[in-house]
Image (cartoon, rainbow, N blue to C red):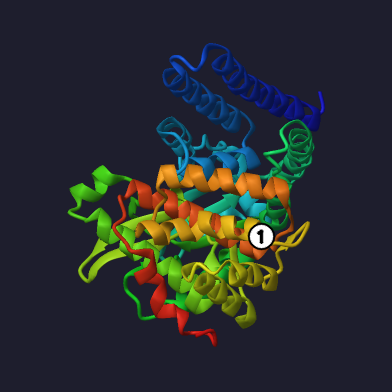
Amino acid sequence: MPVRTRRFLRVARLVVSVYADYKARQIHGRITGGSAQADWYDHQHERAARRLRDAAVDMEGLLIKVCQFMGSRADVLPPSFIRVLGELHDRVPPRPFGQIRPHIEASLGRPLEQCYATVDETPVASASLAQVHRGRTTDGRDVAIKVQYPDIDRVVATDLANFSFFVHLLVRIERNFDLRIVLEEVKNLIPLELDFVREAANARRFAADFAGDPSVRFPVPIAELTSRHVLTMDFIEGVKITDLDALAALGIDKHEVAELLTRVCVRQILEHGFFHGDPHPGNLLIRKEPTGIQLVVLDLGLAKAFTPELRDGIIRLTVAIIGKDPHATGEAFRALGFRLRDGGDDTFVALGELFLGQALQSGRAYANMEMVDRIQTELLAAIRANPIVRAPSDLMLVLRVMGLLSGIGKTLDSQVNPLAAILPFLGASGTK
């Protein structure tokens, strides 16, 4: 059976089984009045999460990235999804080194022994598109060797075609769940993660942006041991940012970690105009240094730069949302390139509330479930009445980052006041 057909059928079985189970519960709830509904949903969430995880492990590729994102959203998804899908942040089954070694040699153009003094054949991490091996260069430098899976380009192309089919089918069945904008975002962003030369350049820029700040660190790439498919960089050890037991064992305050993460991400977006687009827990480590705690940021392929005009536009949007000005919020979204089918600002106001306004209202850096439910209901109603027909991928990525940070903030019980974190940067543009 052709690979694309096999992967298509696997996704089809997954989509049909998960959708049918939830739909059956909805129908049963209407008939019975919803008795024992909460317990049933708890069971169904667990079962759906396991089905997603098992399919992702079996298929690899883009489905793992989708599950990683879902497993980071502790603010909006049930605990079973976070627990089960969170396993995919750094525990994806690796490829045998027998497949990886020839790929390294072909990519770097010489035998492995001429590149490294040693390479540990057991990977220290494996994810959706690549796995990482620890090694040592011929001059004694401890390094992490990140290697793309040999056939990942073909797998990604196949998955994008299959996901496109199901996204367009779903919007015909459930008009409240139009994921076509998200699909376009994925199509635009995935190629960025498949170019390790670009990722190395991103690492150097991040390091320059935070030069002199010992609280954040980015791995330094080695140019002569880096290609489009292989990235060699400093090996840095640390504790996963959401591993609360490990943080506590090191005497690290989780609230201090949340404050550091927020500060670093706000600086990236509002000060530097260059930001990490995939800050899920598997990409963020915490170290304890003599100068204090240190955030280590990994996996820098998905990074985006703003023009000064676009950065100023984001600041204007933030000011409008803080000021609860519906017209200014709508105008700011339009100036950034968003378009609605018809006039009016309701959809933009609901979107701004979901991703920033609710945090400002609650004074917390993560979402309140009741407020999110309310805003999501309002957003869906607004989108049905006046859907978004164009959304710049750069800005959709910012919204995605904010969602990931909200999920991590929930896990860390963040005490950060979002307004206090943002205000120092609002005067940086000409929008006072």
Residue 61 can be seen, yes or no? no
Residue 415: x and y in percent read: 29, 58
Q: Residue at x 67, y 57 (%)?
A: 189
Q: Nearer the viewer, residue 142 or 389?
A: 389
Residue 342: x and y in percent read: 77, 58
Q: Image height check: is 56 above or below 332?
A: above
Q: Is residue 117 left or right of residue 4?
A: left
Q: Residue at x 53, y 11 (%)?
A: 32
Q: Nearer the viewer, residue 33 or 92?
A: 33
Residue 92: x and y in percent read: 51, 37
Q: Image height check: is 388 above or below 169?
A: below
Q: Nearer the viewer, residue 290 or 32?
A: 32
Residue 3: x and y in percent read: 78, 31
Give the crowd class for mark 1: few <14, some 14-19, many >=20 residues within 10 Å. some
Q: Which quarter of the figure is the N terminus placed in?
A: top right
Residue 405 can be seen, yes or no? yes
Q: Residue at x 57, y 29 (%)?
A: 52
Tell which residue pokes out farthest to the top in this image: 32
Q: Nearer the viewer, residue 249 or 1?
A: 249
Check disc 1 and give the amino acid type.
Leu
Using the rendered view, name the quadrant where residue 168 is placed: top right
Q: Is residue 186 left or right of residue 202?
A: right
Q: Image height check: is 8 above or below 65?
A: above
Circle 1 sits in a helix, a strand or a loop, which is it? helix
Q: How many marks?
A: 1
Q: Residue at x 53, y 85 (%)?
A: 429
Q: Is residue 220 left or right of residue 343?
A: left
**Residue identifier under label 1:** 192
